[in-house]
Image (tube, grey):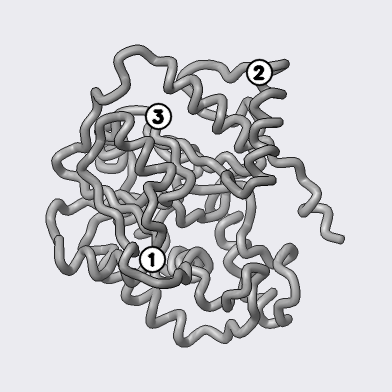
Amino acid sequence: MDRNRLRLNFGPAYGLLLERQMFREKGLKGRLQSPIDLDIVLCTTYASKQYTEKILEYLGINDFTVLGRNLESWKHIYKLELIIDHIEKHPRPGLLLHLDAPDVLVTGDLQPVVDCFNSDFDCDILFSAEKNSAPGSSTTREITESEVGFLSRIEAFEEANYQAPFQYLNAGCFIGRKEAILELFAEALRTREQLDLSSRLHHGDYLYNDDQLVLRELHRRHHPRIQLDHENMMFQNLYATQRSEVAARHPLPGGVSFLVAYLSYLARMVTGKIKRRFISSR
């Protein structure tokens, strides 16, 4: 058994602590709004409001678009198609921020995200970064030798260009210029058709339908035009993080508070109501 599969994941517990920290802040509810030069997009097929929608509305950020509710089923690769279609219909404003609908915790004003992207990054698209390679060359079951080699090349590139621990592209959160997204996502869909990726992942869909994998290959081909927020300046993936690695406004509590949060996470895992959490807008 791969020992990486046995790693404890305390990230969702930190997400719950961050959530409670944010909800306790006075005056935050209903006080924020989306920057006028930012198009916020979420994707889901569920008719009910998802976690990220509720968080945005709690903060008062109501100017966002949910894509995919017209679809009867979901494949991860559909996200690229939906965003391409959205940009073609709505080319302005020129910046697009994508947040995964089920599990993104926005912790404050989004204007600093726009400002940080414009001032601190010389790229067209910026993705969040995570500690875990997914799909991973050593952790993805029952894939072919050539697929292992393909994943290994992507991992080697990410590890060579970004300092540990947040080295691997995560497609859950990204911000970018719409013209570039339109061009590069279209290339990603063409690239997907050319890749020799025939294995199925654990959830039953084919490897070539994994949007994150295709985008990781696109990042390898187009870096530094595409980059990762590996220092968590605006995005942070909480999977397998340590308390010292979480860029929070206030120190996260330990002891009993952490234990209660972790037990709450385990309870939600059992009922299928939580997977992982991200934070944005540091």
Q: Residue 56 location in percent, x, y?
A: 32, 37
Whether residue 224 is visible to the viewer of this picture, yes or no, is no
Alpha-carbon neighbours of circle 2 within 10 Å: few (<14), some, or many (≥20)? few
Q: Is residue 24 above or below residue 77?
A: above
Residue in the foreground of this view, choosing between 271 and 17: 271
Q: Secondary structure at mark 3?
A: loop
Please name the residue shown 39% across and 35% down the image: 106
Give the number of the mark in front: 3 or 2. 2
Please name the residue shown 14% across and 40% down the image: 36
Residue kind at label 3, given as amino acid type: Thr
Residue in the foreground of this view, choosing between 3 and 24: 24
Give the distance between the C-alpha atoms of the residues marked 1 and 2, in whole angstroms: 37 Å
Query: Do the residues under discs 3 and 2 have CB atoms within 8 angstroms?
Result: no
Give the distance between the C-alpha atoms of the residues marked 3 and 2, in whole angstroms: 19 Å
In the picture, measured across the screen, residue 44 lies left or right of residue 237, that is left
Using the image, tell me which numbered label, if any, was put on residue 154.
Answer: none
Using the image, tell me which numbered label, if any, was put on residue 79.
Answer: 1
Which quarter of the picture shows residue 27?
top left
Give the distance between the C-alpha atoms of the residues marked 3 and 1, in whole angstroms: 24 Å
Quickly name the residue at label 3.
107
Give the number of the mark in front: 1 or 2. 2
In the rendered image, the quadrant that contains the C terminus is: top left
Query: Do the residues under discs 1 and 2 have CB atoms within 8 angstroms?
Result: no
Please name the residue shown 35% across and 28% down the image: 108
Residue kind at label 1, given as amino acid type: Lys
Quickly name the residue at label 2.
257
